[in-house]
Amino acid sequence: MTTEAIQTDLTEETEARSRPSAWSRLSQNLSARIGGGLLLLIALIGLFASFLTTLDPTEINPSNRLKSPGHEASIRDDEGKKHKVTAHMGTDSLGRDIYSRVVYGSRISLVVGIAVALISVLAGTLIGLVAGYFRWVDAIVMRIMDGLMAIPAILLAISLVSLSGASLFAVIFAISIPEIPRVVRLVRSIVLTIREEPYVEAAISVGTPTPKILWRHVLPNTISPLIVQGTFICGSAILLEAILSFLGVGIPPETPTWGNIMAEGRDFFQIHPHAIFFPAIFLSLTVLAINMLGDGMRDTLDPRMDRNI
Amino acid sequence: MATYLIKRVFSVIPVMLVVAVIVFMMLRLTPGDPAAIIAGDAATSQDIAQIRDKLGLEEPLIAQFGIWIGNMLTGDFGDSFYYKRTVSSMIADRVGPTLALATFTIFLACIVAVPLGTIAAYKQGSWLDRTVMGMSVVGFSVPVFVIGYIMIYIFAVKLDWFPVQGYQPISDGIGGFIYRLIMPSMALSVIFIALIARMTRTSVLEVLNEDYIRTARAKGLAESKVMTRHALRNAAVPIVTVIGFAVAILIGGVVVTESVFVIPGLGTLTLDAIQGRDYPTVQALIMLFSVVYVLINLFIDVIYTILDPRIRY
């Protein structure tokens, strides 16, 4: 090697070292900044729902049915005193305050999104690691995953909920199942590449036990793609939960979820579109925020990965 | 190539078998007696016994599965518990609207998305490119029923250009048939426009860096010809793949869109069947949708192998 070559080699090395950390690269990314900021705002709305609303989201008020946004109503509290309250987003056909329901609805959406992302990423990683590393498991597991992927996610989720009964847990479970194969495929493909790497062979040759190889050498390589994938799963889970609720096969209708508010507003849509539009705006913005954050993460954390929908 | 094609065709069998096992086990794994679940809350013990007998529940599990598969292969999907008709006749009644909606949607998505994606790639980094890509992220994020209701509100309620909901079979006049399909397929196509435009852009961008594009330009070929004849043709494989993949989303989207626009297709049939706990119908429909998905993807794979001489297995 000539001196010149060594020098370029050295400069390259220092450049690599002075490369900004993943976090600072992410915070420079416009898409991630907008998405992250918006998501934080929605998370805060969900967190402080009880401070942001004055009315119980499940309280039925027959004298205030189907009021337009901005309607003022007087409501008697427990002590019998009359209060003036404003329904910022109007009321639904049972007289419930849509604003309160939308604000509380963000809790359910975020809980479902995060729970599904965690469950499917954890389960998928475990299955993917084993499938990628042990050939005999691989053949069986991948056939099952192919089969699961051949069933459209919405149909699989709807039938799982209808069989196990509508509840928050059933919905989370039902949405996680169709997402797992996508994680398994991702993790497996990474494992298949990594297991051919010299450092893995070196580890095998010095007698490192397999679980340790998986944990120390293989797993770290899956983390950034999985964070990206998990973010997209979170977004699609929120969407799927809303679809299930909207179709009337999700979380029980009295629970304030964005899908339920919209489902309730369907029959009166032509006269009172606000019951659909307000939750729709929140739902779309939340999913948009998550997708933008995911796009930003993919571009900064893992430029090689193609979008996996 | 022939060996690959035969292998590819036969690879459908294990996948469908797994789907069948999943669909079959879903009902069996539910806590409680499947016959009682099917019969519903108001069933007498006589009803339950009748259903047990009909499903062959006294037989061992493997035998039950065998009977079920055997019946399906001969086209017998059983009787609907809800409508008291054969499931296959119900599917035959409802398949038309769904097929029309799906075809219209994919057609619409392709004629809009492929030019959009190509232009975005051609003008990479321009405001046009950024707008197309930005809109595609929005297209992914706004659910189809929200788009549907926004369209109904603007074009049907406010402007009165289209009917709010409904479907007209092609036999009642082609004009009305197309007229009523425009809004639903536009609403459903948004996500596919986003998906296909993105894929087209990525794929065309990759091709544009190839040597043969430079050669084509160097020999003085018009840009429009470079794009259509050389770039798009070579970029086609990933675009077609994404369309095959989109079929899964399309099937889910059809269920939602049919519900929003009250179209009497397979999607609304599925929802009714699930809400009415009409399990033979649900099982048949899930099997049918999965078969369609698997076969379309098989078809696309086969088409490649024949059309693209570079693909060898």
Image (cartoon, rainbow, N blue to C red):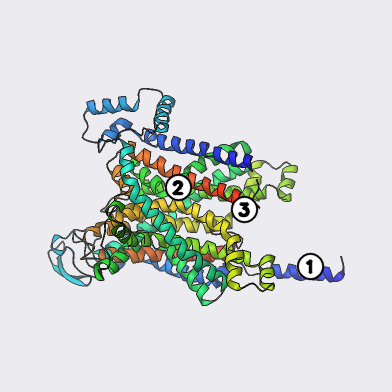
**Which chain does the residue under circle 1 lie in?**
A
Tell me if mark 3 has few (under 14), some (14-19) or many (20+) residues whose alpha carbon lies within 10 angstroms of its own.
few
Q: Alpha-carbon distance for marks 1 and 2?
A: 47 Å
Q: Which residue is mark 3?
A: B308
The residue lying toward the viewer, choosing from B287 and B181, is: B181
Query: Are the residues under marks 1 and 2 on the same chain?
Result: yes
* B78 left or right of B311 in image: left
**Location of residue B294 in the rendering, given as x and y in whole percent from the top left corner:** 48, 44
Residue under pointer 1? A9
Instruction: Point out the frontmost of discs 3 and 1.
Output: 3
Which image quarter is the N terminus of chain B in?
Answer: top right
Identified by mark 2, the residue type is Pro
- Res. A50 in view: no
Task: Kindly identify which residue carries mark 2.
Answer: A178
Q: Residues within 10 Å of mark 2 (few under 14, many from 20)?
A: many
* Foreground pick, A224 / B63: B63
